[in-house]
Amino acid sequence: MSKVQVTRSPIDDSVYVERNLATQAEITQALVKANCAQVKWQKTSLAQRAHICHAMVDALIDNEDEVAQQICWMMGRPIRYCKNEVASMAERARVMIAEAESALKPIRLKEKAGFIRYIKREPLGGVFIIAPWNYPYLTAINTIVPAIMAGNSVVLKHSAQTPLCAEQFFNAFEKAGLPVDVFQYLHLSHRDTEQIIN
């Protein structure tokens, strides 16, 4: 039987979200799927990755009313400030997408007779991201977009206080046409999170 993660709203201490924590089998399956998906994803062009990431941002903006409402209830942030996070996240994401080409290009080293020397940027594979509850979109986007743009797959574990953010990212990437399993999320206990890291 799955354990349940409960998110209480700071507004009135009511239960706002309940989610089953991932089982060991689900964790293993997600990590295997992420690694398999990444092998194909790393072969896509930077332009394709940028197109999908921009479309993901567009999907979040299109859904900003729901996103803002969820932020308000999960964090207790006044609703009038919640849409600002979506706008700031979008601005930051688009800058990182635009900078990806220069950030990922090979670094040329000093010439040496008989050698062509450079450092080539290669995707790492699957990236496990742990996101905090404060500024839950703005902080998460700092690692999600660079990882995806570099050709990695992502498994996101968002804070237990803001679990719907992970689901919103997932839905936005799905609408954007990101291939299956390149971006996934897991609701995890602290113990299971630590085991993945180690």
Image (spheres, rainbow, N blue to C red):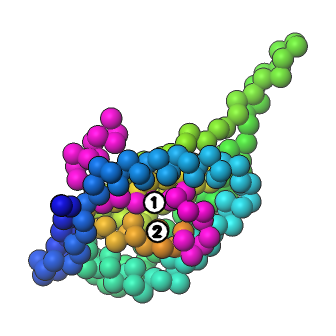
- Determine whether 136 is above or below 114 in the image: below
Q: Earlier in the sequence, mark 2 or mark 1?
A: 2
Residue 107 in the magenta stretch? The answer is no
Marks 2 and 1, how far apart in space? Answer: 9 Å
88 on left or right of 44? left
Which quarter of the rendered picture does the C terminus lie within? top left
Task: Specify start and end residues of the magenta stretch as a single range.
Answer: 174-198
Residue extending furthest top?
113
Q: Position of residue 152 (x, y in %)?
A: 57, 48
Q: Position of residue 146 (x, y in %)?
A: 56, 52
Q: Position of residue 194 (x, y in %)?
A: 27, 42
Question: In the rendered structure, which amino acid carries the disc numbered 1?
Answer: Gln
Q: Position of residue 192 (x, y in %)?
A: 26, 47
- For image coordinates 13% across by 80% down, the residue present is 14
Residue extending furthest left?
13
- Determine whether 20 is above or below 130 in the image: below
Report the residue marked by disc 1.
184
173, 50: nearer the viewer: 173
Which quarter of the rendered picture does the N terminus lie within? bottom left
Report the residue marked by disc 2.
169
- For image coordinates 50% across by 51% down, the residue present is 34
Residue 187 in the magenta stretch? The answer is yes
Q: Secondary structure at mark 2?
A: helix
